[in-house]
Amino acid sequence: MRTDTPQAIRLSDYRPPAFLIDEVALTFDLHPTATRVTARLQVRRNREHSEPLRFNGERLKPISVAIDGRVLSDGERTIDDEGLTIPSAPDAFVLETEVEIDPENNKALEGLYMSGGRFCTQCEAEGFRKITFWPDRPDVLSRFTVRVEADRSFRHLLSNGNLIEQGELEGGRHYAVWNDPFLKPSYLFALVAGELDVLEDSLVTMTGRTVELKIFVDPGMAPRAAYAMDALKRSMRWDEEAFGREYDLDLFMIVAVRDFNFGAMENKGLNIFNSSLLLADPATATDADFERIESVVAHEYFHNWTGDRITCRDWFQLCLKEGLTVFRDQSFSADMRGHAVQRIKDVKALRARQFAEDQGPLAHPVRPSSYLKIDNFYTATIYEKGAEIIRMLKILLGAEAFRAGMDLYFERWDGHATTVEAFIKCFEEASGSDLSHFFAWYEQAGTPRVSLESQYDEAAKTLTLNFAQETPPTPGQPVKQALPIPIAFGLLDGEGRPLRFEHDGEPQDETVIVLDQPQASITLTGVDRFPVISALRGFSAPVVLTTDLEPKDKYVLLAADPDLFNRWEAGQELARDLILRRAAGSPDEVNEERYADALGRALSDQSADPAFKALMLALPSEPDLALVMSPADPQAIHEARDALRTRLSVHLESQLRELHNGLQDLGEFSPDAEGAGRRALRNAALDLLLANPRSDNAAYAHGHFEAAGNMTDAMAGLSALMQVGGEAFGQALADFYERWTSEPLVIDKWFAVQARDPSETAIGRVMGLTAHPAFDTKNPNRLRALVSTFANFNPARFHDPSGAGYRFLADQILAVDRFNPMIAARLVDPLGGWRRYKPELGALMRAELERIAATAGLSKNVYELATRALAQDAQD
């Protein structure tokens, strides 16, 4: 059992660094098991600090430490498992250190490690301390010059910035020297060395500068980086147009690696990507892969200004770079893919991940106040809710004032590490607004609940809207304050026609009110007919909204709301209510048929985007439904949702077949929004069609699978056959594996589709797959494909009443924690919501968390999340 208790790091304890490093020269003598790292640092004491020098350093084999050329004796410096201490360091000096590290055996994939026979780094958040002694915090900004020496077999030697020198060395070795002219924190340092192919292009910036663009990939894979290159060029151009931000170096590089804990990393001028988020062609990647690549390439590029040129003062300010950059990449994707469709997808992701986080013991503010391991706060709250806060800021201020605030932020804080307060201050100054109340969105955890009730006075032609807000208690924050919540809304009449109204004396079709008190009422005048209220249009705030709308009103919104998000939302609410009624034992078959009729009419709308129709066809997911059922019963939800799917499938059978047959890709594959939307609708029709138990559906799905001309359709066919199960599914799996066995990213999909299998044999299948020759626990992609997919996206089987799913996950967490604590910790979350489930399930989940927390030698990463999930004050 663990006997030591890690100490929390607190925002309130922040102090500026005692020592600063203006310039650093690093030399890497690369060797797989014995890399020598020599660091020459120009160090100066920071103002009035008088404490000893203390630099971080972990898993380093020290060779020497010298100040101004004099090697220090053991009595003049101390080296322990966590770093270097020099008690009597002068105020300004040159510190020279030499250490040895072992990249090949670094299975945590932090610092410098080997992946596929190549050297690679990952330094965010605290990986640089595993490379050399350094004050490993984001508010120490330095200019880096890096010399890399290696055997000639490591053909490309890459680091941040500009290549200023390269050449040959004796003994079949060579070198390259890189200089980054921009100040950066150590977490943005990057190094890659190995045999790689490169795809090259260029872009002329808005001021006429030519920037070289290079994407480095596995040999033979350069053609699969073409879409990523296209996305990069579009994102660079978009950032110039939307935010006035031009790229600053003469070279921008991306490298794809197979073994990577993150999706991608924004290292200045040298982004490192998980290959799953960079490589794509129609044969091996789905439309979802193309879309994700487009988004992530843009996200990491946008970090050049929101994260690199301006970084965060400390890790509590993580949302300052991540939430802001997610907002920017979502805005880019909306321009590329369609605003309504993108908004729906973004909100679905927010609800699935962040709303669930807010309802559990791991709830935390967008800017946390304490942590044990910062790795555990790369969460949906920091990213997705952080982006929603920026979106609300733009709604409240208007586009023009928002842009002025961003321009001021870039001007004032370029080259600095700063805080959320400083960011918000820029918008206050640019707009003349008082945003002090708005700042509570950063400091208060939880998802606000907003209620809306209305009264219509037919004689006076007035409509009174009564709003109320409440945020449930979260761990450490039992009492909540009211937040400023922008609520966009409009009105329709009973036939779905827009209704004009007057608000504040102005005729309007749509308006935004700000609910900033626990309760508030407004009265609209000039409302000529009985209204149907379309509230929270575009999901204008990250809240849960309940209204007094009747089902008949929601059908009006489903049929005619000009706000496509609310049209989709109405359909989701109707479906959710039907599923939950059936799960509670009171099915409403009359309204299930009515819903099927309405859905059929929506599918017949020739003016609607196919991608939007595909979203309309998808019922609320089982995890989403579990968030609104108390206590959650995953088995009942699964059965009720399947029953509604079957009813819809039978009711819409001819329409679904017509859609499927009429949307075949007859021309050349294109990953653009139009082509992807057509395939999305065709495959959504197939998926729902397979819920019909007709005997010929297996043959229908098999025909789709066999005829697939791209990976999108192949995976849709395989998923459809999963619903059929039995021999048809087994044979398709065997054929798929045999065809793609040499393609790791495709085999990840093969594992993932089996992890989603809802049949009663799924647990045994998943457990068996961990012994498959192609399964590698040390590869994060493969682990996520099987274990994380099973725990997060197969609730019916993960929550098996026997507890076998929970035991399996706990076993995997403990096994992975021995060598990669960061990845192990990310597997804890599915157990963390144990209080939301039926008591008998919750008890089994809690028991596994207790087993995890009591394990000897547990990492800080897993210990923090397991103990927070068990804490008594996490109860609602």
Image (spheres, rainbow, N blue to C red):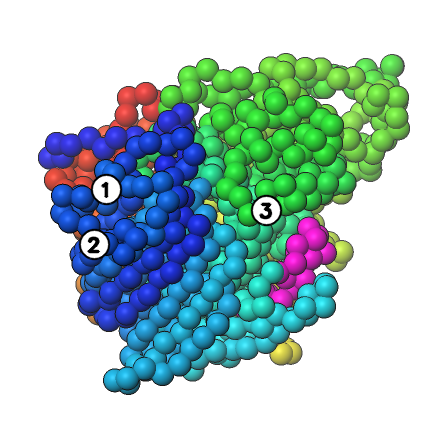
252 left or right, relative to 839: right
- Disc 3 target residue: 414
Q: Earlier in the sequence, mark 1 or mark 3?
A: 1
Q: Is residue 644 above or below residue 111?
A: above
Which numbered mark, 3 or 2, is in the foreground of this view? Answer: 2
Question: Residue 244 magenta-drawn?
Answer: yes
Q: Where the N terminus falls, by quadrant? A: top left
Span colored in magenta: 227-247
* Amino acid bearing label 2: Val
The CA span between labels 3 and 2 is: 37 Å
Residue 441: name its quadrant: top right
* Amino acid bearing label 1: Thr
Q: Residues within 10 Å of mark 1 (few under 14, many from 20)?
A: some
Question: Helix, strand or loop at disc 1?
Answer: strand
* Residue 303 tag number: none
Question: Residue 407 magenta-drawn?
Answer: no
Q: Is residue 240 above or below residue 223?
A: above
Q: Earlier in the sequence, mark 2 or mark 1?
A: 2
* Viewer-nearest residue: 85 or 398: 85
* Viewer-nearest residue: 542 or 555: 542
- Disc 2 target residue: 71
- Disc 1 target residue: 85
* Amino acid bearing label 3: Asp
Residue at the spot 49% in from the left edge and 75% down from the top edge: 224
The CA span between labels 1 and 3 is: 32 Å
Residue at the spot 33% in from the left edge and 31% down from the top edge: 50
Q: Is residue 786 above or below residue 561?
A: below
- CB within 8 Å, label 1 to label 3: no
